[in-house]
Amino acid sequence: MQDVMKGVRVLEVAQFTFVPAAGAVLADWGADVIKIEHPVRGDGQRGLLQVGGVDNRAAVNFLMEHSNRGKRSLGLDLTHPDGRDLLYRIARDADVFLTNFLPAARAKMGIDVDDLRAVNPSIIYARGTAHGARGPEAHKGGYDSTDYWARSGSGMGMRSEGEAPAMQPGPAYGDSIGGMTIAGGIAAALFKRERTGEPSVVDISLLGTGLWAMGAGLAGSMLRGNGDGGLPTAGASFLNPLVGIYRAQGGGCLMLTMLQGHVYWADTVKHLGHPELATDPRFATPEAFAEHGDEARAALQAIFETRPASAWRDSLAPMKGQWGPFQTLAQIPDDPQVVANELIREVDLGDGTHFRLVANPVQFDETAPTLRKGPEHAQHTEELLLELGLEWEEVTRLKEAGAIN
């Protein structure tokens, strides 16, 4: 069964990726997600012309589709009394209210916790923030680059000693991980309400999600109690030469992570075509292997540079130890494991053509989710208002008043 959230209605007043990505995951799981957009401007993300150097004005707006697939869009002006009244009418039958607007904006639009609970005391209220719901910066905004990547320590961890902090891996990287976290929090809140009848206020921040991602390293740093960052930075030399990045011929790279290094040494060098290294006195025993780690690392690097990464993938496939290739975005769709697990799915544009999106990583009963195209701006306004029981005359009046689009 894919539609584990069937029958759950989510009312989303959010824009960009962090919180809307949570709504996309819930829609993948079968929830009815109603996205409220400004009747004129829409989600601010619709207006981004370029993202990471990529044109965002094409027929398929890749950021909007990633974080809004499967939703219905209602163009509603929440600063207009009629618009706000319509929101409350929808909220009466909603299970979840989802937002990433800042406190001042929530108060202005009348969408804070008390406002929604006044019309629906059992609604679950979920808010995503940059820095957290409390503290001196609770009223400020931010992005995944500022909080998930920079402030949480991830950017400083992904660098070699002496290098500048790393740029974030790609558009909406922390936002997408944060969206999954919000969806999980909402699922837990729905379960609690089912068991106890009590609704929750669910808070998730980019900063908190980033700290969780760096949690193991941060725990080590705090236990060490020093000021050098706690754990080795990326690229640092490990005693175990079977942990690290190795360059292949032509510039490709492979990541080895065999934590029990000497256990895998003989099998590894056999698959690398150099079984003689297993009995080399420098590496033959665990003690010698540790003592001559730098020499083993140099030997491995010299071997890897003799063939391209694509050739090593075939040779290392049956190897017992753990490793992985560094892949470009262009290579990922053809990865055999990505294909076998249906981690990328086709989406119907509605005109006979298709495009592809990454599915959320949660699968139920070994079934990949079916992905549906994201809505156009205010695409479902009339449909949703008619569901509320409005007559056409009232819909026309609201359009003329500027409350809807």
Image (spheres, rainbow, N blue to C red):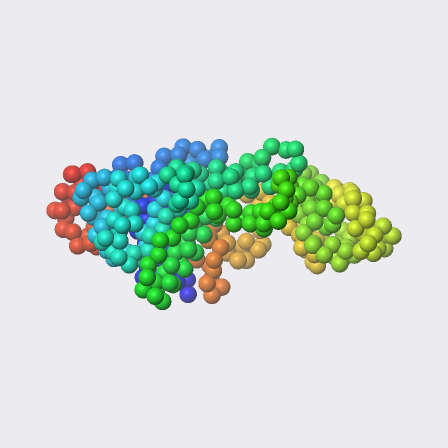
Q: Identify the residue at the far right of this view.
A: 281
| Image coordinates for residue 56, horizontal then vertical, percent | 42, 36
In the rendered view, would you say 234 is above or below 269? Answer: above
Residue 250 rendering spot, x and y as whole percentages: 69, 38
**Which residue, as the protein is rendered here, is positioned at the far front?**
225
In percent of width and height, residue 354 lies at 42, 48
Along the viewing direction, whichever of 303 and 144 lies nearer the viewer = 144
Give the left or right position of residue 327, taking residue 237 as reference.
left
Q: Work out whether residue 100 can be spotted.
A: yes
Q: Residue at x 48, y 32 (%)?
A: 53
| In-image side of 300 versus 377 (left or right) | right
- Residue drawn 25% across the image and 56% down it: 120
Q: Is residue 326 left or right of residue 307?
A: left
Against 250, residue 393 (above or below) is below
Q: Residue at x 37, y 63 (%)?
A: 192
Question: Is any part of residue 355 visible from this angle?
Answer: no
